[in-house]
Image (cartoon, rainbow, N blue to C red):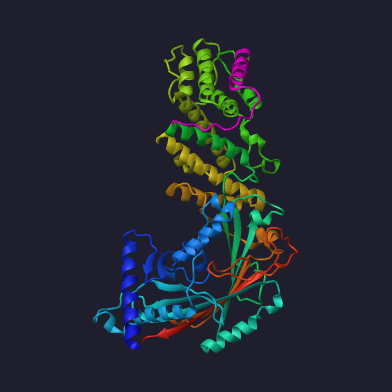
């Protein structure tokens, strides 16, 4: 028996050491173990269900069962019988192992990490491995869904013991009488750990804004704003976080959401991205036009207005034209007008962009429009005003026309697309500057990186896309959470810092520390999506804790739960509705080697 345990421990140790090295060298995994298991090595953020239960420090091994060939065939047959599954790939749920097998794996792992078991290392010191977690099938009496083992280490990275974790799950239920009392949880913790002095810490997460919080909403969007509360001294189960809590907003915003106050600005940016892609690939996917008149007709009207109103020397009329050719931000909902203000200083190139972007439907449309403009400039029929410092091809031609010395330009190849992209890019940069500086959320120096012309056009478009995502984040918080400058300023600075160092990423979650009183109206009469109490005792390496958690969503993704018919659908629940919660309890014990 001991020989078999010893061999199993040695085999697991060799595998985990090998995986550790392979991951360092960039191998993604998963890595097979025996015939039926596989091992992942994850970092914080890569295994969301597990993060509810572990400390999140460093890497972790996750063991699960491999999908057998016959199981894959069965799933394939099942998918073939449902036509809706053919259009998109369905994610595969991870598979658990039996609780007995999980205990054996943790036993082997603990043996290999015990510094007293020198036979595993030929007398060498222990090579400390990341913690190990195993998915369990929850078929035992306790409904165990995770088992974990985490080395207890000194400052010098020497192992002195092992923390063993067990996660049990149940639910969902809306029957609050089935929940244990806080006193019962404290008593259980004291008896398990023989503790006299304990502390409690609360955690709650509320969903402030998402598709789920909009009644009768069927909008598919990744936009989501939640708030996390942490406080010491929990009074009761499902206690509303006190105003003394530390609270953090978690903000993830997806551009293109129809509910966004800056959706019209997004559509303008979207056309800019279409042009940038066309310039890169040579193929342009033209969107549907928004005007009944043709692009050539609209541009000719603009030129005719200039011919009749401009004197060609002291030009003050463009500002009147700007009032007629509305910037797209004018279409923004009135609730946000105080944030997004219409620019009244559109120059000729910007007015031309506004006309063309809504009406061009082909490459030839773009070429014909620019041909009209260039002919009028060359013949001295118009002398339009443009912003100082404008560097687009069209702006340079306009500047040359002032002196009657225009260079020849061929409207062939990708030149018309580039010219339209240039004037749109310059116009949108000024729009974003107007917004951020006008609301005193940033200075020109902070925005300089995003509006720089020292990089190529594609990179300029990429940076403007970042600016738009920042605008979406800030405007959504202003419009739907009523956040004012006090909070919008640090949020904007956080966005600017992130996007100066990282590529465009709408999956990124921006965080903002905020006083609970600022958002009290949004959570105090609502149900938390997650509520958790931690009961702690001991200090330092000997600290132990018991966690008990309620969550509106399943706490694990590898166990199926029986869903009662009475469960309320979270997408239509109002403030007065009772919701069903899944229960999870996380307990730990310690083994000390010295």
Q: Which quadrant does the C terminus fall into?
A: bottom left
In this rendered view, identify the residue nearer to me: 353 or 397.
353
- What percent of the width, then of the height, locates residue 409? 43, 17
User: What residue appears at the point 70 percent right and 44 percent down from the top-left corner?
Assistant: 335
In this view, the residue farthest toward the top is 379
| Left/right of residue 566 with respect to residue 344 in the rendered view | right
In this rendered view, identify the residue nearer to me: 69 or 552.
69
- What percent of the width, then of the height, locates residue 250? 56, 58
Task: Answer whether residue 350 is visible to the viewer in this image.
Answer: yes
Asked if 357 appears above or below 160 in the picture, the reply is above
Please say whether residue 281 is one of the residues in the magenta stretch.
no
Q: Quadrant of residue 36?
A: bottom left
Task: Answer whether residue 444 is visible to the viewer in this image.
Answer: no
- What percent of the width, then of the height, locates residue 512? 56, 57
Please say whether residue 301 is one of the residues in the magenta stretch.
yes
| Left/right of residue 376 with respect to residue 259 in the rendered view | left
Asked if 225 appears above or below 35 in the picture, the reply is above
Asked if 124 appears above or below 81 in the picture, the reply is below
The stretch of residues the image draws in magenta is: 282-308
In this rendered view, identify the residue nearer to me: 42 or 15.
15
In this view, the residue farthest toward the right is 576
Asked if 592 appears above or below 453 in the picture, the reply is below
Q: Which quadrant does the N terminus fall into?
A: bottom left
- What percent of the width, then of the height, locates residue 146? 50, 74
User: What residue appears at the point 54 percent right and 31 percent down from the top-left corner?
Assistant: 286
Q: Quadrant of residue 533?
A: bottom right
């Amino acid at each position: 028996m001991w020989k078999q345990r010893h061999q199993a421990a040695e085999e697991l140790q060799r595998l985990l050491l090998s995986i550790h090295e392979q991951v360092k060298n960039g191998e993604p995994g998963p890595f097979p173990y025996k015939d039926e298991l596989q091992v992942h090595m994850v970092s914080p953020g890569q295994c969301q269900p597990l993060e509810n239960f572990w400390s999140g420090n460093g890497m972790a091994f996750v063991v699960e069962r491999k999908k057998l060939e016959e199981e894959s065939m069965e799933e394939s047959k099942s998918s073939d019988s449902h036509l809706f599954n053919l259009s998109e790939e369905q994610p595969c749920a991870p598979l658990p192992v039996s609780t007995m097998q999980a205990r054996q794996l943790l036993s082997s792992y603990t043996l290999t990490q015990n510094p007293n078991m020198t036979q595993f290392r030929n007398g060498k010191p222990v090579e400390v491995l990341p913690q190990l977690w195993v998915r369990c099938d929850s078929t035992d009496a306790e409904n165990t869904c995770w088992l974990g083992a985490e080395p207890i280490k000194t400052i010098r990275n020497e192992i002195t013991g092992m923390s063993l974790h067990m996660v049990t799950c149940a639910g969902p239920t809306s029957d609050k009488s089935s929940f244990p009392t806080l006193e019962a949880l404290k008593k259980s913790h004291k008896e398990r750990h023989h503790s006299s002095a304990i502390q409690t810490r609360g955690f709650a997460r509320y969903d402030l804004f998402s598709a789920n919080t909009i009644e009768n909403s069927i909008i598919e969007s990744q936009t989501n704003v939640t708030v996390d509360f942490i406080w010491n001294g929990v009074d009761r189960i499902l206690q509303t976080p006190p105003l003394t809590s530390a609270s953090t907003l978690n903000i993830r915003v997806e551009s293109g959401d129809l509910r966004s106050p800056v959706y019209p600005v997004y559509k303008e940016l979207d056309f800019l991205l279409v042009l940038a892609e066309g310039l890169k690939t040579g193929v342009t996917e033209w969107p549907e036009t928004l005007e009944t008149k043709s692009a050539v007709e609209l541009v000719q009207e603009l030129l005719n207005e200039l011919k009749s109103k401009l004197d060609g020397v002291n030009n003050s009329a463009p500002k009147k034209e700007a009032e007629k050719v509305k910037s797209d931000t004018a279409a923004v909902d009135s609730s946000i007008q105080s944030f997004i203000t219409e620019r009244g200083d559109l120059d000729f190139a910007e007015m031309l962009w506004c006309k063309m972007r809504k009406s061009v439907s082909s490459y030839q449309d773009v070429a014909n429009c620019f041909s009209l403009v260039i002919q009028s400039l060359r013949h001295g029929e118009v002398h339009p005003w443009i912003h100082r410092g404008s560097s687009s091809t069209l702006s340079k031609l306009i500047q040359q026309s002032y002196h009657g010395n225009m260079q020849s330009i061929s409207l062939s190849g990708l030149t018309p697309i580039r010219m339209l992209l240039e004037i749109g890019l310059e116009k949108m940069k000024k729009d974003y500057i107007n917004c951020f500086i006008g609301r005193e959320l940033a200075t020109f120096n902070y925005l300089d990186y995003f509006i720089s012309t020292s990089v190529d056009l594609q990179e300029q478009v990429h940076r403007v896309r970042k600016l738009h995502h920042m605008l979406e984040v800030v405007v959504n918080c202003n419009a739907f959470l009523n956040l004012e400058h006090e909070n919008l300023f640090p949020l904007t600075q956080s966005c600017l810092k992130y996007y100066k160092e990282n590529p465009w990423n709408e999956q990124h979650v921006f965080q903002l520390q905020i006083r609970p009183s600022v958002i009290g109206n949004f959570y105090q009469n609502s149900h938390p999506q997650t509520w958790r109490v931690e009961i702690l005792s001991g200090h330092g390496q000997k600290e132990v804790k018991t966690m008990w958690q309620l969550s509106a969503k399943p706490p694990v993704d590898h166990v199926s739960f029986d869903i009662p018919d009475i469960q309320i659908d979270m997408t239509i629940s109002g403030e007065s509705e009772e919701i069903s919660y899944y229960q999870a309890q996380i307990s730990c014990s310690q083994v000390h080697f010295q």
